[in-house]
Image (cartoon, helix red, strand yellow):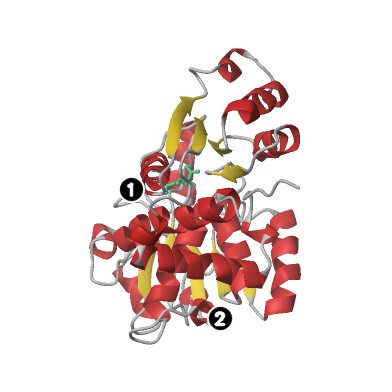
């Protein structure tokens, strides 16, 4: 059966740790993987803008000996109404895998259901799993004992996500659950995570010991945080709600006072792009606790691991 990478919730804790260990090995020994995907092609379908996802996947394929094709949904026939089912079947005859950034998560599921090659979620309205695997890699590096790398370093730590209960919040909840890392989402009422996602994340967390919580309390909610994470208040596709959201999220900015309530040594993360002065102050975003660019770099290494895992012929 063709394997896909659509959600971190689909990974067993052991598989998630294996992927992080592989990502770390690829990061430290990139030369050992130069031919890992030799002769293989990844098609990259984009319904939305991207800097990091597009560039890191394209560079990642090149570094693994393969090739990547950028396919704007406006430029292929999907944009003129060709079905996802037909697109998936046709692309499966040319490509070795598909990465897609889409609005509805069902589009990814349709690509996976109708194609015969692996599908990777490069962000949907529901989830952003490549981002949170890169985040898990970054936090495991940060919290591992000096000189070592241990994916178990995430277990028992606490990540507090402050902001919209969106695709990032959902994938961080799943990632925390799978790795045994506590996740609190601090968001205004009305912007809390999807209940179906919460239920599934809680079911996973019951097995791993992660504690998951949701609150609108920006004071008590961040106490005990080892990492404070945020994302934009208006995601791609929500541009028309931006002004209303700016009002609704007042008081939810990650600033120095909020970082001061976290644990000593806590780090700040953001999937980027960031809006300084909105969801995060410039002082925090560009301050000493911020690891946003290590996080962005790790998209490359984490995704190379995902691609090798799905595509390498054994
Ligand atoms: N974080 C992230 O996915 O960035 P892009 O939208 O630039 O790909
Ligand atoms: N929540 C954001 C993440 C961007 C990487 C969005 O969907 O636009």
Cα gap from disc 1 to disc 2, whole angstroms = 30 Å
**Left or right of residue 258, residue 314 in this image:** right
Identified at 46% across, 48% down, the residue is: 233
Identified at 46% across, 63% down, the residue is: 23
Q: Which labelled disc corresponds to residue 275?
A: 1
Are there few (<14), some (14-19), or many (20+) residues within 10 Å of tag 2? some
- Is the C-beta of the residue carrying label 1 under 8 Å from the nearest atom of ligand 2? no
Identified at 48% across, 42% down, the residue is: 235
- Give the residue at mark 2: 155
Whether 219 is drawn above or below 134: the answer is: below
Q: Secondary structure at mark 2?
A: loop
> Looking at the figure, which quarter contains the C terminus?
bottom right
Residue 215 in sight from this viewpoint:
no
Whole-percent x, y for residue 203 in the image: 76, 69
Corner quadrant of residue 50: top left
Q: Residue furthest top?
A: 80
Whole-percent x, y for residue 131 in the image: 48, 54
For the residues labelled 1 and 2, say whether their Cβ atoms are less than 8 Å apart: no
Whether 113 is drawn above or below 268: the answer is: above
- Tag count: 2
Instruction: Looking at the picture, tell me which residue is in the foreground, 165 or 43.
Output: 43
Whole-percent x, y for residue 3 in the image: 68, 49
């Amino acid at each position: 059966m063709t394997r896909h990478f659509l959600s971190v919730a689909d990974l067993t804790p052991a598989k998630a740790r294996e992927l992080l260990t592989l990502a770390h090995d690829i990061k430290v020994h990139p030369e050992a993987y130069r031919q890992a995907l030799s002769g293989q092609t990844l098609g990259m379908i984009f319904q939305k803008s991207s800097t990091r996802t597009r560039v890191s996947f394209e560079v990642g394929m090149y570094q693994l000996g393969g090739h990547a094709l950028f396919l704007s949904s406006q430029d292929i026939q999907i944009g003129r109404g060709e079905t996802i089912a037909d697109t998936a079947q046709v692309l499966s005859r040319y490509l070795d895998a598909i990465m897609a950034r889409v609005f509805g998560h069902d589009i990814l599921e349709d690509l996976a259901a109708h194609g015969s090659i692996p599908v990777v979620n490069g962000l949907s309205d529901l989830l952003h799993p490549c981002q949170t695997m890169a985040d898990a890699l970054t936090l495991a590096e940060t919290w591992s004992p000096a000189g070592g790398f241990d994916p178990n370093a995430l277990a028992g730590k606490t990540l507090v996500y402050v902001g919209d209960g969106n695709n990032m919040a959902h994938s961080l909840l799943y990632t925390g659950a799978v790795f045994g890392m506590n996740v609190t989402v601090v968001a205004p009422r009305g912007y809390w995570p999807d209940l179906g996602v919460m239920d599934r994340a809680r079911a996973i967390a019951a097995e791993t010991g992660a504690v998951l919580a949701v609150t609108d309390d920006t004071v008590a909610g961040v106490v005990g945080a080892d990492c404070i994470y945020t994302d934009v208040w208006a995601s791609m596709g929500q541009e028309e709600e931006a002004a209303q959201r700016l009002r609704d999220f007042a008081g939810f900015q990650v600033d120095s006072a909020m970082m001061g309530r976290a644990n000593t040594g806590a780090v700040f993360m953001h999937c980027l792009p960031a809006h300084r002065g909105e969801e995060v102050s410039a002082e925090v975003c560009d301050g000493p606790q911020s690891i946003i660019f290590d996080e962005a770099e790790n998209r490359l290494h984490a995704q190379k691991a995902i691609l090798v895992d799905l595509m390498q012929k054994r």
